Every structure is written in C-alpha cells, then in structure tokens.
Amino acid sequence: MSEPLLQVKHLATEFQTEQGLARALDDISFEVNAGETLGIVGESGCGKSVTSLSIMRLLPKPAGNIVQGEVIFDGQDLVQLPADDMHNIRGNRIAMIFQEPMTALNPVYRIGRQLGETLALHNPKMSKSDIRDASIRMLERVGIPAPERRLKEYPHQLSGGMRQRVMIAIALLCNPEILIADEPTTALDVTIQAQILQLLKDLQQETGMAIIFITHDLGVIAELCDRVLVMYGGRIIEQADINTLFDKPGHPYTRGLLKAIPRLDQPPKEELSTIRGMVPSLFDFPPGCRFQNRCDFVQERCRQETPELETYNDGQQVRCFRFRELVNE
Amino acid sequence: MTQYFIRRLLLIVPTFIGITVLVFVITRFVPGGPIERMIAEVQQASMQAGGSMQSAGSGVGAATLDEDQIRELEKYYGFDKPVLVSYWEWLLKVVQFDLGTSSRYSEPVWDTIKERLPVSAFYGIVTMLITYFISIPLGYYKAVKHNSHFDHASSVVVFIGYAIPSYVVGIILLVVFASNLEWFPMGGFYGDEFEDMESIWQQIGDIFYHAALPLLAYVAGSFAVMTFMMKNALMDNLAADYVRTAIAKGIPFRQAITRHAMRNSLIPIATHFGNNISVIIGGSFLIEKIFNIDGLGLLGYESIVERDYPIVLGVLVISAILQLLGNILSDICVAVVDPRVQFR
Ligand SMILES: Nc1ncnc2c1ncn2[C@@H]1O[C@H](COP(=O)(O)OP(=O)(O)OP(=O)(O)O)[C@@H](O)[C@H]1O
Ligand SMILES: [Mg+2]
C-alpha cells in the first residue's frame, strides 16, 4: 500500500487559560489517504476544530500551542516547518473551509478580489485576466449562477449557501490535495446542506482530493465518508471504516451516538435515547477513561487506568477495555 | 445614494433654523444685554466724571440715558419688534451672507469671523492630521503587540494625556517651555516680524514655531480616544473569522492584518471623522485664551461675555453649518469604506 497523504502522530495541543494549561488534544494519531474522505465526529468541545487548526497551524496565538507530536505531509513535519513554507502549503496544497459562511469572508472586499487573492498568492506569474477567467470557471464549478456578475458583488449580497460555495471555490482554486471542512453545513438549512454535500462529493470525484470532514452529525458522515474518527474529550476513542462503524460500533460512546439518531423503523414519538450526563470541562476529566462517568459499562479498572487505542479486526481501533466482551453481545 | 445625500443636505435647513431660533430667543431674554450694558457703562462713566466734577456742584443722577435714546438703541438692535419678526429679518440677511455688525467692534461680523476662521481652521486641521498620524499607527502597533511592555507603557502615556484636561497641558507647556526655558514664544499666531519675512517658508516656519505648544496641547487631548478606538477595532478584527480565512489561504499574518483587518478597523475611525471636524475647526477657547490665539473659539466666548450678539449668532451660524456638514461628511466616509452601508 502506498504512503498515506497525511499522517498525524501523537499530536497534543494545549491552551493557556485563566485556570492554567488545558490539554485540548491528547495523543491524536490518524492517517488520511489520497482521495478518501475521513470523517471526524464528536460532541461539541471534543477537539474537532482544534485538530484541524493544529494541522493547518492556525491555532489562536499565543494561547494555543502544539506541545507534542508530528503532522507528516509530503515527507515533512508541518509542526516544525518554517512559517514561509507553511504559507506555501496553506490554501495551495491543504485548504480549509469553515462553519460560518456569514463571517468567513471579508465584508469590505468584492468576491472577485477574495478569489483572485489566493490565485495570485500561489501563482505569482498568473496574469490579471487569467486570474479572472480561472475565478469565473471556479465559481461555475461550485454552482454559482452568473459568475461574472458575482465577482463584482460583496459578501453581504449573497445568501449563506452561496457564500459557502464561494468559500469552497476559494479553497479549491489551487487544486489542494487535502480539503479540511470544519462543519461546513452546520449553519445552513437542510436543503442547502444537502446541495453542499453533493457538491463536495462531485468535486472530489473530479479532482481526487482527500477530504477531512468534521461534523457532529452522523447522518452526514454516513452520506459522505469512507472512514470515521470518533473523538471524545480531546482523544480519539474509535476509528473505523464507515460500514464497520455503523454495523458494529465498538465504543460505548459511539453506540450512544448511533442510538441517538432518529430512525424511520422506530415507532414515532418514542423518546430518543440520549447519552446521560454531560461532557466535563477539560479540567474536570477524571483519571482513567474519560467517558467513565457517562458509561453504562463502566468497571473499576476504567477509573484507574487509561485504555489505549487498540486495533482489532478490519482495522477498527477502539479505546475501551471491554471492547471484546461488548462487541459479541 | 446621491438621493440620500441630497435629502440630507435639504434637512440642514430645518435643523439650522431650529438651532438659530433657539439661540436667538435666548439672546433676547438673558439679562445683561447690550442696552443694559450700555446704560451701565454710561452710568459708570458719569459716576467717575461726577466724582471729579462734584466740586463744581452738578447733580449725580442726570447722566443716565433718557427714554428716547434707549428706544433708539432698541431700534438699532431690533429689540423693538417681536422676537420672531426680528429673527425673520436676521435670517433674511443671513441668507444674503450679511451677518450684521458687531456691537463691540462696529465692523461687519463676517469680516471679524473671516479673520479668525483660518486661524482656528489651521489649528484644527493640523491637529487632526497629527492625531490620525499618531493614533492609527500607534493603535495598530498596540493591537499587534497586545499585552507587551510597549503596549502597557504607551497606555500609561495615553491615559495621562487623556486624564489631564488639555488646557492644563497647555498651561504646563507654557510655563515650562515658553516661560522658563524660553524655547518657544509665549503665544500669538505669528511673531512681530512676520510681515517683513522674505520667503513664504520663513513665514510657515514662524507659524509652526508659534503653533508648536498649542498643537501639543490640542493633540494631547484628542489622540487618546482615537488610539484606543483604533486598537480595539483592530483587536476585534484580528479575532474575526475572515482573518482566519485569509491566513488559511496562505497569506502571512502581517499581510492579513494590513490587507484585511486594517480596512475593517478604519470603519469606526471614519464614523468619527465628521464629528471631529466641527469640534476641531471651532477651536477650544481655553487653549486659544492661554496661548493668546485669535481664533473662533475665543471670539465666540468673548462675544458671549460681552453680549455682542451679532457675533455670537455669526459664530453659531458658522459652527452649526460645519457641524451639519461634518455629519454628512461622516456618512460619506462610512459609505466609502464599508460597502455594507447602504443609504436610502
Ligand atoms: N482559544 C481557546 N482557548 C482555550 N481553550 C480553547 C480554545 N479553543 C478551544 N478550546 C478548548 O478546546 C476544546 C476543543 O474545542 P474545539 O473547538 O476543537 O471543539 P469542537 O469539537 O470543534 O466543538 P464544536 O462542535 O462546538 O465546534 C474545548 O474544550 C475548548 O474549550
Ligand atoms: Mg468546532
């Protein structure tokens, strides 16, 4: 098998806060292969965004710092890379789109300028008219009608869905090898959401780029992803391909998430199951397994030792002492 | 947009009338008006004269103005008619650029103002330029270096400048640099030799030599607000999503600030711009008084004290128009820097 496109190894990220150092990511390791879609799922605050920001080295400075680990891309460790080399990678070879299309574009510049800026930055030799043509073609590809006219408009003149399309257009201008999408559809209504997901799928078919898709919606994961990471409290607690995850979820937390999805074969108006309890704050996690106080299968051992992320059949990785017992139930 | 500004320009008319009616009526009813003043002056003069003439044996009470004279004066000042009628007459003259005649200097009000306006405008505009020139880069630097030693140290200086009233700054500067050290002149807009200077450069140099201390006093009072406005706006924008987008595009951090965050941070500064203009051209009578500058602020103040109503009203006309135009100018500035602003 060929080398993975991106390898994240034992990544740990900390924030300086009023209450001291908060470890937002702990021992995060995963790989992204060329052309695949990796989903990252988990509750709010579990570290999905921090993971993507760490890869892109976009952590808010000076509070956020990568304290350990490597991010290997194209044979180099992005964590150690000089700032100038990182500028050449961002927006060019690894691109990113964000959750809030309403605020992600600069309100005072025209769409054309915001597209052209990226192209000019990574292709200094490109002429003005080439940049314009490429921008128009890109807007067409992301399904924006009348692109010539849109170039002259300001962000506030576009709807949320259109703005997210513009963001996608900006991200794809330089044909990135990896697109990181951090909840790109959460702020949009459902029909627009479906359109954007379809657009990402189509564009991936065309370009062969890999996508890291972050969401808290397992339904979106099912539609889009090849492989899934489940995060909890800054750690990966399960990693599996999409079929394995939905057929035989390994971690009690993953099972909880799956049960919480409404299904058509359920009798209507029945109460949805939820995972009991709340996610503790980063400072209040107990020693041992971080999920222990919400887990139905908790044992004494879970309170004392931290389980490792173990690999089982089909490459499924689970961070749970009781995986083997539970999986056969 | 053009329509909006035409409407705004038309709105100046009723606002202007409102302001001037108010002040006009007040001048009528405030005690110590020009006629009472004149009566008092005549009385005083006759008391002194009477004192020296007492030996000659003439009466004391004889020297007030008689009824006819008072009526004549009332007519001269237009006090014999109802307020609104004389306001209307005044307004008709103003529309023809006739602001009346000063009761103190007996010369046309417009001439007096015309003499003072450039002085105040010079101080106002130079102060504004210096203020922007200091505040924008300083605010920028403080935002980028937030929480650094430089940030804290400059905050102390800025706050001191903010806390001390500018006339106190003026007095301190005057005492230290003009009176004790004698580096700068004690006051005035230019020196005695100004008329005889050969080149215009020498003259400009002389004006700035005289202007150095008052300008410092003006700037000390005004740059604190602007600096903090700039810093806070830039800090807010640095944390904005679109700056993160810019960096995710591959733009280096510095350029993301100068190309993206700066433009947005100038919006509040632009909003402020028009407000500054009227305050600034009007001048501060205290600073003008301290440095003995014949500006509009001092003129207005003295005319109020002396009940020289034609001048009071003339200064009011000028500053009201400046204020109203300043507001519109503000709106234009905002519309220029912020495409989201749509005037209808
Ligand atoms: N700037 C910051 N300063 C301090 N702590 C932070 C900062 N940003 C994130 N964190 C902490 O890091 C943890 C992970 O946050 P993150 O934003 O990655 O969550 P998320 O999984 O993306 O959640 P969501 O679904 O709400 O986007 C949270 O506990 C959060 O409190
Ligand atoms: Mg997030």
Image (spheres, grey):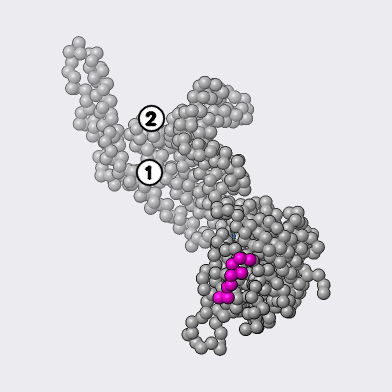
Q: Is residue B65 left or right of residue B120?
A: left
Furthest residue toward front: A300
Q: Is residue B231 left or right of residue B14?
A: right
**Residue B104 tag number:** none
Residue assigned mark 1: B93
**Rounded to the nearest whole Å, what is the CA distance between mark 1 and mark 2?**
19 Å
Check the picture and name the quadrant holding the N terminus of chain A: bottom right
- Residue at 64% in and 62% down: A25
Q: Report the magenta residues as a range.
A: A296-305
Three-letter residue code for mark 1: Lys
Viewer-proximal residue among A276 and B231:
A276
Three-letter residue code for mark 2: Tyr
Mark 1 or 2, nearer chain start? 1
Where disc 1 sits, the SS reads helix
- Picture coordinates of residue A204, whole percent (x, y): 72, 75
Q: Let me know if residue A301 is in the magenta part.
A: yes
Viewer-proximal residue among B247 and A221:
A221
Above or below: residue A160 compared with residue B340: below
Residue assigned mark 2: B105
Quarter of the image where ligand 1 sits: bottom right
Q: Quadrant of residue A263?
A: bottom right
Check the picture and name the quadrant holding the C terminus of chain A: bottom right
- Picture coordinates of residue A122, whole percent (x, y): 75, 60
Does ligand 1 reach within 8 Å of label 1's beta carbon?
no
Q: Looking at the image, can residue B232 be seen?
A: yes
